[in-house]
Amino acid sequence: MKTVTRAAALSALLAAALLTAGCGQTTIATVSTETEAIEIIDVLRESGFEDLEKHEVGEGEQRRWAVELDEGLFGGDDAAHALQRLRDYGLPRQEEEPIPEGGFVTSEAVQKAQERRRIRADIERQLRALPGVTVALVTVVMPQDPTLELNPYPASASVVVVHKEQTAPFTEQQIQNLVSKGVPKLKPEDVSVTISQQQPRPIPRREMNARRLNNLLLFVCAVVIFGLGVLVAALLVQARRQRARIAELTSAAEEEEEGPAAVESAATTAAPGGELTADAAGARGRELTS
């Protein structure tokens, strides 16, 4: 009985271990700013992914933000579909290389490069706020200083906007006006705009639920098979112990039966001249039975 109880306890322990292993979280993206991490979470929640959280990783200049998705027990490839949705929205964005400083790069050039990046990031953020926009890419050329160049070129910009609506809820002129207001001395006619329509790929919820159900059934079958195997092994061990115990009892019983029979045989087969006295026969019998 103890062996069977131990087998049941071992099966329960295995089931608990497998359940714990199935509760892991998957890192979807690691980005350099908390703002982008929040944007990623918003996009995924709009797509039906609920169990999301962000937290800091690293310290100092290496500090970053990780976005994790809890797929729950017996996940249905939620992480893969979440990554697919992020790619459709151009997330996470490619990180830019740090601007080199020192050497032949002056502090003024560094400041101009940083200002150009800030302007571009602001314009892209404004474009993504437009209805239906999934991806916005901007390239900005700042105007040359006329005091330093004989024939300075003017400011210009190129914009690529991808939206998911059947018809664009904005016009090219609206995009040009928005971008030109964000760049010094940029005229709307110097803004090149490309507008594209692309629906994000659908999330196969039915397939995900079916895969999750299959994983659940496989888990249950694995636990049942393992439990049966442990139970059968425990029963075999218990049966072997019982057979050994029965054999010991049978051997002891046979030895008890052989004692009186040996005494009687010794008393009846003794010959004259070599006869055993009654007392000697009794002593012999006690020796045999002891």
Image (cartoon, helix red, strand yellow):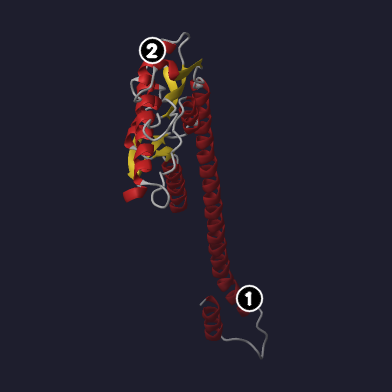
Which residue is under mark 1? Answer: 265
Residue at x-position 33% and y-position 41% = 55
Residue 147 % position (x, y): 36, 33
Marks 2/1: CA–CA distance: 124 Å
Q: Could you say which disc has been placed on residue 150 in the image? A: none
Say which quarter of the image contains residue 32: top left
For the point 38% across and 12% down, the residue is: 174
Secondary structure beneath disc 2? helix
Above or below: residue 247 compared with residue 29: below
- Tell me where residue 207 appears, x and y as whole percent: 53, 23
The residue tagged with tag 1: helix, strand or loop? helix
Count residues near mark 2 (Cα–Cα under 10 Å), then give few for <14, some for 14-19, many for 20+. few
- Marks 2/1 in contact by CB < 8 Å: the verdict is no
Res. 92 image quadrant: top left
Q: Which residue is mark 2?
A: 174
Foreground pick, 83 / 217: 83
Task: Residue lying at the far bottom in this picture: please name it.
Answer: 273
Q: Position of residue 265 (x, y in %)?
A: 63, 75
Judging depth in this view, the residue of 175 and 132 nearest the camera is 175
Q: Earlier in the sequence, mark 2 or mark 1?
A: 2
Residue at 39% across, 51% down: 102
Vertical side of 83 occupied by 270: above or below: below
> Which residue is at the far top?
167
